[in-house]
Amino acid sequence: MSILLTDISKNFGQFAALNQINLEVPEGELVALLGPSGCGKTTLLRIIAGLEHTDKGRVLINGEDKTDQTVSQRGIGFVFQHYALFRHMTVFENVAFGLRVKPRKERPSNEIIAKKVHALLDLVQLDWLHNRYPDQLSGGQRQRIALARALAVEPSVLLLDEPFGALDASVRKDLRQWLRNLHQELHVTSIFVTHDQEEAMEVASQVVVLNHGRIEQQGSPSDIYDHPANAFVSKFIGQTNIFDFDDQNNEWLQSAGLLTANQAGKIAHVRPHDIIIEKADTSNTASAILKDFQHLGALIRIELIKNNANGSNAPVFAEMPNEQFKQLKLSIGDKVKLKIRQAHWFH
Amino acid sequence: MNTTTQPLHKDKIVAQQRALQDPTWVRWSLIAITIAFISLFICLPLGLVIYQALSKGLQAYWAALSQPDTWSAIKLTLLVAVITVPLNTLFGVIAAWAITRFEFKGKSLLTTLIDLPFSVSPVISGFIFVLLFGAEGWFGKWLMEYDIKIIFAAPGIILATLFITFPFVARQLIPLMQEMGHQEEEAALSLGASGWKTFFSVTLPNIKWALLYGVLLCNARAMGEFGAVSVVSGHIRGMTNTLPLHVEVCYNDYDAIGAFASASILAALAIVTLVLKTGLEWKQAKR
């Protein structure tokens, strides 16, 4: 079901955690709230859940105003970073909890509860653990149980607070893929909070970038990467080289193929893969020194040093396919010529 | 947690422990000093209480215990415990909840104040109640008018004991509840559970061992408190003497058997408390 937030503001004392947030999440999407720590993303998620009160603004779920409802009335599913499983209950009882606490009239019979819990445990592929206690499970297993528990009450929306934040890198990678697949199967509107841009790009169908309590940009992962709305988004999503258009850089950038018109005061953000490296010719323009390179599998990450007009140095990062790099036959210390394919311009 | 890897590491851990250990003579002399100290200052007096109580035979022991004054002291002690322990359990849970779950001004001051009964001499605690409710106290006149007796009567003893034993439950719960955080409770609420349901099915099971432990300590102190109770009780035989006070009265009367017999009940109570406490700790460690 869709989520609509209008004009949400939240202060903690003097600190404005959220500042007039307007956000619409269409039904069935898997949305990432992405931002650096302290940007207000978790607060926003908790406000949607009803775990936190908003100072101003409304929260609508499927057109229904939920602002004044408590968390237990909202019918949401919430998954915590540190799982928050009930430690004194077995896996089975954890998942059954949401069904057992329903008012007597709505409460399913024990057989139906058992059937449903086992179905959910099958869905997260952990039915064989139903008799264990949470402290007998690995982190990844716990988080999958937490998800099954949240899904048991058939929530209208699923909210996940840094769901992979406490897991090992390899487990995290698997679970990301798994969550995406699960979402494609269930189609429940979901929002998850993350500070990891890679995770957001990999899992979400929509990414909302937050900073200092404001939304910087909302869009599909490719939108956000290819058309960053501002310098913050460009810097936060993926790697980028930043060139100021000043006396130091003007000539060098022009010879590297960036616009010739006067761009004074502007800033160019260039993705590493938009920098083309060629063997240096005699012209000595747009040149740089190869300082180091690292293998990232299919790609080579190249660290270059650019000499500024005033004699200072600036690092430039580039990326190119492994094969292509081999053909150039470069070694550390070589002089190369750079071409910039494209840049994003900001003030 | 991960039982399969333990055997592999066990040898290594043992080796590490050995490397970190002090020389044998240091270990043994420290252990010997501890045992000697405990024997001399704890086991010996406790043994002596029981020995003295039974020194004139079982019959004299029973005779001392079945005196009406002793009986009345036992009954008053039980009454005080039955009233103060549940009340302080309730207040302790409420205080721990308020301090660990809410943010409010003056919270750190409140946390410090909970410890006040521990840091103030019990005699002074008792004296405060005399100043409040005694004949010359703030509410003394008013109480006299309505013929309500607090000081030199059971209500005063109960009040003083409430004050003295307040910190036990709260002190046990606060660090535990702080460490646990409230995410499990939030999870229960998000699954549609009511506040009460969340407390009884999530919070209470998590704190139950610490709570029981606090209740035990609270009970031991409620029955054993001397200083504060001594000030407010007035030592009226058969009326306002609790067991600890009765021990003193008997002793002052050169009634050694009576004193030691009453003391042996308190000592037995202490031993039961310790056994239960050890059992609880053992159970807690097993979980």
Image (cartoon, rainbow, N blue to C red):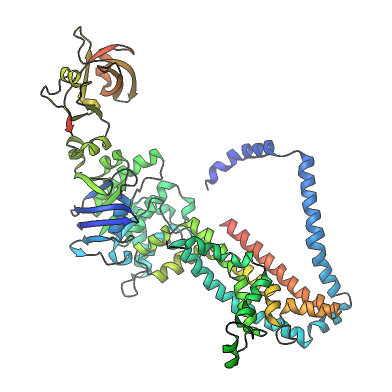
Quarter of the image holding residue A236? top left
B126 to B203, vertically: above or below: below
Location of residue B109 in the rendering, given as x and y in whole percent from the top left corner: 51, 62
A24 to B204, vertically: above or below: above
User: From this viewpoint, is residue B166 visible?
Assistant: yes
The residue lying toward the viewer, choosing from B108 and A234, is B108
Horizontal side of B265 relative to B94 (left or right) equals: right
Location of residue A194 in the rendering, given as x and y in whole percent from the top left corner: 32, 45
The residue positioned 20% from the left and 13% from the top of the image is A285
Location of residue B261 in the rendering, given as x and y in whole percent from the top left corner: 80, 77
Quarter of the image holding residue A307? top left
Horizontal side of A320 relative to A114 (left or right) equals: left
User: From this viewpoint, is residue A186 visible?
Assistant: no
The residue lying toward the viewer, choosing from A158 and A260, is A260
B157 to A159, vertically: above or below: below
The residue lying toward the viewer, choosing from A304 and A329, is A304
- Extreme top residue here? A282
Report the quarter where the C terminus of chain B lies.
Answer: bottom right
- Extreme right residue here? B56
The residue positioned 16% from the left and 24% from the top of the image is A341
